[in-house]
Amino acid sequence: MAEAGPIFTAVSSNAHQLYALLHCIGFAQNAMVQITPDGIRFSVEEGRVIQGLAFLDKALFTTYTFNLPAINNENENPVVDSSASENLDYPHFVVSLSALLETLKIFGIGDSTATNSMRAASVQPSNVSATSAFTAPSLLLNRSCTFQYLSHGSPLSITLAETGVKTICELTTYECDDGDLDIPFQRDGIIMKIIMRSAWLHNAITELGATNPQVLKISASAKQEPFFTLSGSGGPFSESLVEFSIEQDNQSSENPSDLHRKVLTDDGTSRSRATRAKLAPTVTETFLVSPPSSMGTRIKQDYRFSFIQKASHAMAAANKVSIRGDRQGVLSLQFMVEFDGTGAITTNTGSRSIKEAPASTVSFVDFRFVPLLDEDELRDEVTHDAFE
């Protein structure tokens, strides 16, 4: 009987895209990998209270070959997002995510990601071209990165090639634990959905982080002001607040960066307000808030601020973010990361639609957070950590 070929082989002509997406969820040492016909799914988690999901779509690769093994494993797979069918048992294993990122950095692509993070820290859009003879995306055009997974239990092989020189790295794969399941998010029980520019969320979290808070409080209402606020509390300094509100003076503003700066510095007392036909913060593209009757007219939920900060790389890299909350309090931050024709991240598209972006590729990174039940839970965790 002829020996079957590798389960999975994929070739990328621009490893910068792969590194940028995986770097967004690089807060954990290890990642669970699942290979599907539509792409590779990476999942990381910490303490079953925060989870990061990155999907490397096969569109990011120049060639993508997947051969489903004839004999499936007996272990039940975690739930797969819409990128893959949920009913099939695709190969899955655990690898060192930190080792994978270091492997991809052999091409020297870390500098480009750091530049994008610094650029996103400001609400001013950058008009400087991201491509030149000395930028990392340009340098990667003549290089290739090949992923290969031969069979169940084999290492994940990564081959980096440049002008005839090859570097081969084999990452040991490990069996997944039975507890490696997704944090459940009720897609049919969403009570809050807010879509806005990711740079505005990144700047808000950065502003709040200056006071070193322990808790991030999210408040949203579709009927009364303030419509959407983020506040930090529990730190050694006073409580800080960022309010996204309707500003009458900004109704005709065409510069979203100016609008954001005014919203961040608004003290809530000195500016006039206006009511639009659809009550929503001016800085949001979508604002849907429908709390259950038990919550009244306002959604309020608390989360560990340090966990939210772990999504800062994704906030800096993404164009837009979808902030969603379900009935059980789980928070989902889904980031849209867009690459241009050279593979560089584009963070200055503003309100431009995806269809208008020439030769662009869109990928998504998802974070899920379990809410804090009460302040006593947070104090118990802090006390436990102090005496460990």
Image (cartoon, grey):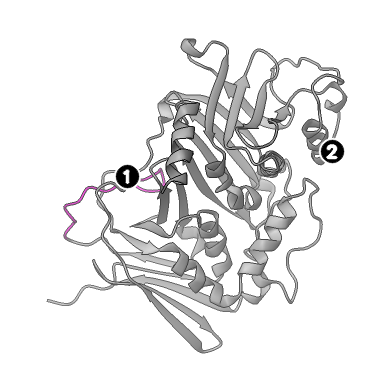
**Kind of residue at disc 1:** Leu
Q: Tell me the magenta residue range.
A: 71-85
Magenta span: chief secondary structure: loop
Residue lying at 44% horizontally and 63% vertically, measured from the top left: 97
Q: Toward which corner of the image does residue 136 lie, by quadrant?
A: bottom right
Magenta region includes residue 69:
no
**Kind of residue at disc 2:** Asp
Q: Could you tell me residue 10's position as x and y percent?
A: 42, 68
Q: Is residue 270 left or right of residue 279?
A: right
Residue ranking furthest to the bottom: 164
Residue 181 numbered mark, or none: 1
Q: Which residue is mark 2?
A: 258
Q: From this view, report whether residue 346 is shown above or below residue 282.
A: below
Q: Is residue 48 left or right of residue 293?
A: left
Residue 62 numbered mark, or none: none
- Residue 341 visible (yes or no): no
Give yes or no for contact between labels 1 and 2 (Cβ–Cβ under 8 Å). Answer: no
Q: Toward which corner of the image does residue 72 lie, by quadrant?
A: bottom left
Residue lying at 49% horizontally and 73% vertically, measured from the top left: 103
- Residue 157 visible (yes or no): yes
Residue ranking furthest to the front: 387
Residue ranking furthest to the left: 1
Q: From this view, report whether residue 24 is shown above or below residue 196.
A: below
